[in-house]
Image: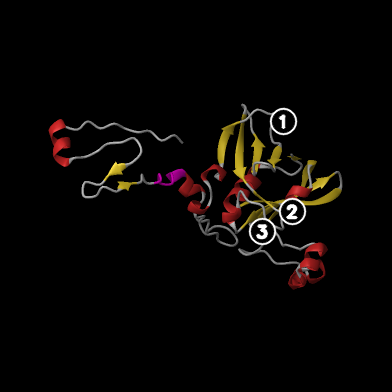
Amino acid sequence: MNKTIHRRRFVTGSASLLGLAVTGCTTTDVFSDKPVEPKEPSIPPNYVAAYGPMPQEQFPLPSVDLNKVPRKFWRRQIDYTTPYPVGTIIVDTSTFFLYLVEEGGTAMRYGVGLGRAGFSWSGEGRIAWKQEWPKWTPPAEMIEREPELEKWSAANGGMPPGLDNPLGARALYIFEGNVDTLYRIHGSPEYWSIGTAVSSGCVRLMNQDIIDLYARVPKGSTLIVV
């Protein structure tokens, strides 16, 4: 979204009376010599709507504070050339982007966050299972590092779904053949972590984004992780 600087014409006499200096980067307060920094552009209404509250969900979602998420990681459709067919999900771990290949040389791009598991697996898989508001079961290795998670172990039935569940509002489960890779694409309540790497987890999206992706991706879709 390019900023456009509009020039305004001022009557020469009025400008001289006000002593107003006009520059391309800052404006000068008439009553002060201190430059005033230009304000950040407001969040466009379409993004306010896209990341607004979702009261219709099983667990009503609050809105996302987009001031805490770099603008480049907001969901958007982009021009995208790839040899992979329409419907393929491509995760680029070097840029923290997930692409859903669309027709006409475009893709829907989402910002993601990554954990140790998100970096440890690469290659091709398929979405074998999809789940709305999934339970979360921490793996045994995580429980060894964090014994307090034992209460959510598989033996104890896992952590029930909800706003604080680490898998968020939706999860896509990735298999290689018939083998579970333990690799997940899922939502996260910690939207401020998008675009960063943390100690645990796979590929996480803002809850509003995983809901959008979930609706677009059928079971059996191909996933490429690079």
Q: Main secondary structure of the magenta part?
A: loop
Image position, residue 129 (x, y; %) = 76, 50
Please name the residue that numbered disc 3 is placed on. Answer: 133
Compared across the picture, whether 25 is left or right of 209 comes to left
10 Å crowding of disc 1: few (<14), some (14-19), many (20+)? few
Residue pushed farthest front? 33
Residue 212, position as x, y percentages in the image: 60, 46
Badge 2 local density, few (<14 within 10 Å), some, or many (20+)?
Answer: some
Given the image, on which type of amino acid does mark 2 rest? Arg
Instruction: Tell which tag, 3 or 2, sits nearer the viewer.
Output: 2
Residue at label 2? Answer: 116
Left or right, residue 206 beside residue 20: right
The residue shown at (44%, 34%) is 2
Segment colored magenta: 40-46
Marks 1/2: CA–CA distance: 28 Å
Q: Of 152 and 58, which appears nearest the observer?
A: 152
Identify the secondary structure beneath mark 1. loop
Q: Position of residue 153 (x, y in %)?
A: 79, 68
Quick one: SS at disc 3? loop
| Lower sequence index among marks 3 and 2 | 2
Q: Is residue 33 shown in magenta?
A: no
| Residue 63 in view, yes or no | yes
What distance separates the C-alpha of mark 1 from that of mark 3?
29 Å
Instruction: Quickly name the residue at label 1.
Output: 85
Question: Is residue 172 at least partly visible in the picture?
Answer: no
Q: Are marks 1 and 2 in contact (CB under 8 Å)?
A: no
- Name the residue: 32% across, 47% down: 36
Task: Name the secondary structure under disc 2.
Answer: helix
Q: Quadrant of residue 221?
A: top right
Of the two numbered discs 1 and 2 on the same chain, state the one appearing first in sequence: 1
